[in-house]
Image (cartoon, grey):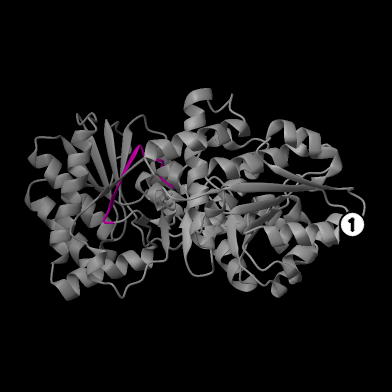
């Protein structure tokens, strides 16, 4: 698990290290500058003619120190200052004077030459306003240069909190950040602007300040081991029973993919509750599944009650349809089911017509909307949701007391307090059925006893890892949703869980 910080949290950790631990700010600045200089060398960048562009804040102070350290290594360096002298922070002013004392001239007229490498140290993580005027001109000029660009901490113009472009922003080839990765470096479009993101330890250690809670995190390969351990003395009932209420006329595939994915994730039994027209397809595709069918025209209360009572976990929505009977089934399940419930696809589309039924839930509910479905659920525009995708997921989860899995290139999972940001997965997963696979994965983890939030978060991560493995095998162009399911077992095998 890796915590991701916003700008305020990072500033607080930085301040605590200086004020409470006693590490001088200039020491941290020197360590930051050394990290950048080392990464420039490690990347093998052409340092024949380096330009370091510095702003007036502490990010600029880092930049002046980088210029000095490169010059000490024999690099031909031009240090440039963009900003107002009266706005220089105390540390930036001191680093600027040190540069001048070392014979490094500070240029303000630097755009008439070409450089092999440019270091961006204009704005740091504290940027809170749109970039305009001369600053925008400099950034636009940088982006037009053939030089490689290295950004100090974050590309200037990117919001550290949301990843939003604040008017204009530097497109870096490498970004060297410090202590923790920031939320805006992980979310798009900020992630694109960072290029190769490298995080370096400079002596800011958050564990020394346990009262500074951080609620946003991401997973790495080691976290796959969070999946419950299988016991030598066990049976199919040990690993849970999943009920998938899925499929409709001509939409049997969604039920097939979600049920197979639940099995591939490790659950013990899967029952598919589906219209009679899908029975033969599902039994042929997945003979391991139990199939309970209904005529598809009338509310099947008796059959549904029996299936719900049998299950430990239920999922509803993949290929389900949006008719009146489906609406009645969804409402009944949401209001009467007393075990973990996952709602996806058509279940979400039906739910968007009356989200107030969520107020009557008796058990944990996980919703897995993509952006379009979230627009319908919240009556928001795409732009409003993407303005701050983490906040959107958190607010929705908090309002309805659910777990919201807001799917995008960086899926956000929130229970209203904690927020997981997913970094696995790729563009090849943008294909029909991918969401049905995710529903099955989350249900499979829930059936094995994981808490709803943990199952949703790890499920999203596993789903993305399987997608990455499928891409390696098929390419982003050639993969389909079934390839993701196929790789689930390989991912779990590789993790040796």
The residue closer to the viewer here, 292 or 46, is 292
The image position of residue 286, as x and y in percent, is 68, 35
Q: What residue is shown at x 31% (from left), y 76% (from top)?
A: 211
**What kind of element bears circle 1?**
helix
The residue closer to the viewer here, 421 or 146, is 421
Instruction: Specify whether residue 172 is painted magenta.
Output: yes
Question: In the rendered image, which residue does mark 1 sit on?
Answer: 324
Q: Does residue 130 appear in the picture of this structure?
A: no
The relative height of residue 1 versus residue 435 in the rendered view (above or below) is below
Q: Is residue 150 left or right of residue 285?
A: left
The residue closer to the viewer here, 393 or 110, is 393
Instruction: Specify whether residue 142 is painted magenta.
Output: no
> Few, some or many C-alpha atoms within 10 Å of disc 1 (few <14, some 14-19, many ≥20)?
few
Q: What residue is shown at x 48% (from left), y 47% (from top)?
A: 461
Q: Does residue 237 appear in the picture of this structure?
A: yes
Q: Is residue 351 left or right of residue 18?
A: right
Which quadrant of the rendered structure holds the N terminus?
bottom left
Which region of the structure is painted magenta? Answer: 169-179
Q: Is residue 80 left or right of residue 400?
A: left
The image position of residue 448, as x and y in percent, is 52, 54
The image position of residue 144, as x and y in percent, is 42, 34
* Residue extending furthest toward the front: 233
The relative height of residue 480 versus residue 247 in the rendered view (above or below) is above
Counting the numbered discs, the total is 1
Q: What residue is shown at x 16% (from left), y 53% (from top)?
A: 31
Q: What residue is shown at x 51% (from left), y 61% (from top)?
A: 453
The relative height of residue 473 versus residue 111 in the rendered view (above or below) is above
Which quadrant of the rendered structure holds the C terminus?
top left
The image position of residue 384, as x and y in percent, is 63, 59
């Amino acid at each position: 698990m890796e915590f991701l910080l916003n700008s305020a949290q990072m500033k607080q950790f930085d301040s605590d290290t200086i004020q409470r631990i006693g590490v001088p700010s200039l020491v941290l600045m020197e360590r930051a500058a050394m990290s950048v200089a080392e990464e420039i060398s490690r990347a093998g960048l052409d340092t024949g003619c380096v330009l370091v562009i510095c702003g007036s804040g502490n990010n600029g102070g880092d930049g002046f120190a980088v210029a000095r350290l490169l010059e000490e290594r024999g690099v031909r360096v031009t240090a440039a200052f963009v900003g107002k002298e009266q706005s220089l922070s105390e540390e930036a002013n001191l680093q600027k004077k040190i540069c001048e004392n070392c014979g490094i001239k500070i240029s303000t007229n630097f755009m008439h030459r070409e450089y092999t490498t440019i270091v961006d140290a204009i704005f740091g993580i504290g940027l809170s306003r749109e970039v305009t005027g001369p600053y925008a001109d400099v950034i636009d000029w940088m982006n037009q240069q053939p030089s490689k660009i290295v950004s100090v901490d974050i590309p200037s113009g990117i919001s550290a909190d949301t990843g939003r472009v604040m008017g204009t922003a530097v497109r870096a080839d490498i970004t060297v950040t410090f202590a923790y990765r920031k939320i805006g470096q992980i979310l798009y479009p900020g992630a694109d602007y960072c290029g190769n993101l490298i995080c370096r330890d400079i002596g800011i250690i958050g564990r020394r300040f346990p009262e500074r809670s951080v609620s946003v995190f991401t997973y790495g390969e080691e976290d796959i081991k969070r999946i419950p351990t299988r016991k030598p003395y066990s049976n199919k009932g040990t690993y849970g029973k999943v009920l998938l209420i899925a499929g409709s006329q001509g939409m049997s595939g969604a039920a097939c993919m979600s049920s197979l994915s639940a099995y591939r994730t490790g659950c013990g039994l899967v029952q598919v509750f589906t219209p009679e027209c899908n029975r033969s397809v599902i039994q042929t595709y997945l003979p391991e599944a139990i199939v309970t069918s209904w005529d598809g025209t009338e509310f099947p209360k008796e059959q549904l009650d029996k299936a719900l009572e049998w299950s430990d976990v239920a999922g509803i929505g993949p290929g389900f349809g949006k008719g009146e009977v489906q609406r009645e089934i969804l409402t009944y399940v949401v209001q009467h089911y007393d075990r973990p419930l996952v709602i996806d696809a058509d279940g979400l589309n039906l739910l968007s017509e009356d989200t107030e039924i969520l107020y009557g839930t008796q058990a944990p509910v996980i919703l897995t909307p993509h952006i379009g479905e979230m627009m319908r659920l919240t009556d928001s525009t795409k732009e409003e949701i993407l303005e701050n995708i983490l906040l959107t997921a958190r607010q929705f989860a908090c309002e309805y007391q659910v777990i919201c899995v807001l799917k995008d290139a960086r899926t956000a999972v929130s229970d209203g307090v904690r927020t997981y940001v997913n970094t696995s997965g790729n563009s090849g997963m943008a294909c029909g059925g991918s969401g049905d696979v995710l529903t099955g994965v989350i249900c499979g983890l829930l059936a094995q006893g994981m808490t709803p939030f943990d199952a949703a978060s790890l499920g999203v991560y596993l789903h993305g890892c399987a997608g990455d493995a499928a891409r390696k095998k098929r390419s982003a162009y050639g993969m389909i949703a079934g390839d993701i399911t196929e790789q689930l077992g390989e991912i779990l095998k590789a993790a040796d869980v």
